[in-house]
Amino acid sequence: MKTLSTMENRLLVLLACAEAALLLDRLAVGFLAPFLIPDLKLSNFQLGLLSSLFSLSFAASGYLVSSLADRFGRRWTWITALILLFSGASAACGTSNSFASLAAARVTLGALEGPFLPIALAVMREHSSPGRRSFNLAFVQNVGAFLLAQLAGPIILVALAVHHGWRAAFLFTAVPGVGIAAAMFMMRHNFEEGPRQLTQPGAPAATEAAWDRNVWVCVGIAACMGSWILLQMTFLPKYLVQVAGLTPTHMSLVMSLLGVGGCAASIILPPLSDRIGRRFALRIGITLGLIGPFVALTVHAPLALSIGVLVGSVGLGCSPLYTSIIPADSSGRASIARAMAAVAGSSAIFGGVIAPSIGGTLADRFGLSAILILADVLAGLGLVLTLTLRRPIITDTVETPLTRPATAS
């Protein structure tokens, strides 16, 4: 039993670090925007388009490759190859000398990152103890990512850009993934699965039934909250510098607070949902998430602004509930990665393709404040959608909190 727990913890830390490495590069464009824009002469629309192109390839590749991994198995091989290829492609961003070359690099990165998290979460769930599934999924998805990418990321990347240029900062993002891929290769015998049976009686009908409701509602919530997240990640650094009057260094510290609150909420909310219900925990997170953009719009005093961003970051911490935990609770084992990829794809397409492009256009026409207003409107819509969630029809494990009568929903 001790051996199983040790291997579970090793897997947990490894996959969390891998997701952090991927997220660090995904967020790098936003953190380095004050340096990229004058050097490459980018407009707000082009800055938003970089995020959109990344997310479009992220969504398309994520669903396609996750479906193949569900169908044929060998999930460990998939994620090992993806993190290694992603690290190599990440370095290419630092060699870009125009919008076109940077956009091409981001499209490649999106295609490689998209399938990673759904497949990795399917692996983590398969090797998790029943009582730790919610915690493990949230930890892999958010905790390592927030601590290493969101908390430390802006401080490290901005410092590198100030002293060595933004190209050196991009090259740095490629380093962690190489070591993680090597560790994954060495641990392959512990976690690799064999080829999957292509026919599983009863699974298609059951999966279809579950997707009629909860997974599709999560697709809608992810579209709204993904937009809320990506709009802030892409434009909030620029807003804090140009509108709120912060220095780039002070901006990086405020942005790092998103990592602090998001990490704390990821540790607390998903396990708490085992007790109070998934839906109620999700509503708490989204409601608190509305505070961040509102405070940034109305208060520019550094301390009050920092507190508002910190409280609003709880909205980041509830993302595992609608992107992985509820879809996994509502899907058959053979389609878990595909279900989570569908939700992640919705977040990527709406949050990463449509919303940043609209946000960039609004910013060019009405100012950066319009982006934060749009972010909170979309989060409010996501909160409304949580009212339509129901208990899942399918679980392939022991009874989950969503299948028990919930007093707080």
Image: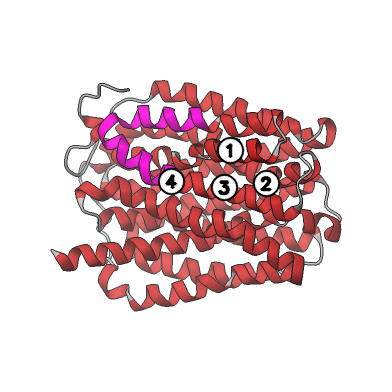
Instruction: Provide the residue designation for mark 3.
Output: 257
Dominant secondary structure of the residues highlighted in magenta in the image: helix
Q: Is residue 110 left or right of residue 168?
A: left
Q: Is there any visible trace of residue 30 in the rendered image? A: no
Distance Cα–Cα, label 1 vs label 2 = 20 Å
Distance Cα–Cα, label 2 vs label 3 = 16 Å
How many residues crowd mark 3 within 10 Å: few (<14), some (14–19), many (20+)?
A: many
Residue type at numbered disc 1: Ile
Q: If you read the primary sequence from the N terminus, does the residue marked by circle 2 or circle 3 appear first?
A: 2
| In this view, the mark in front (2 or 3) | 3
For the residue pair 316 and 130, the one nearer the viewer reads as 316
Residue type at numbered disc 4: Ala
Q: If you read the primary sequence from the N terminus, does the residue marked by circle 3 or circle 1 appear first?
A: 3
How many residues crowd mark 2 within 10 Å: few (<14), some (14–19), many (20+)?
A: many
Q: Residue at x 42, y 64 (%)?
A: 79
The answer to whether 69 is drawn above or below residue 294 in the figure is below
Q: Is there any visible trace of residue 273 in the rendered image? A: yes
Residue type at numbered disc 2: Thr
Residue type at numbered disc 3: Leu
> For residue 96, what is the image quadrant?
bottom right
Q: Is label 2 in a helix, a strand or a loop?
A: helix
Q: Residue at x 39, y 56 (%)?
A: 119
Highlighted magenta segment, given as a residue range: 264-288
Distance Cα–Cα, label 3 vs label 1 = 9 Å
The answer to whether 310 is drawn above or below residue 50 in the figure is above
Instruction: Provide the residue designation for mark 2.
Output: 234
> For residue 301, what is the image quadrant?
top right
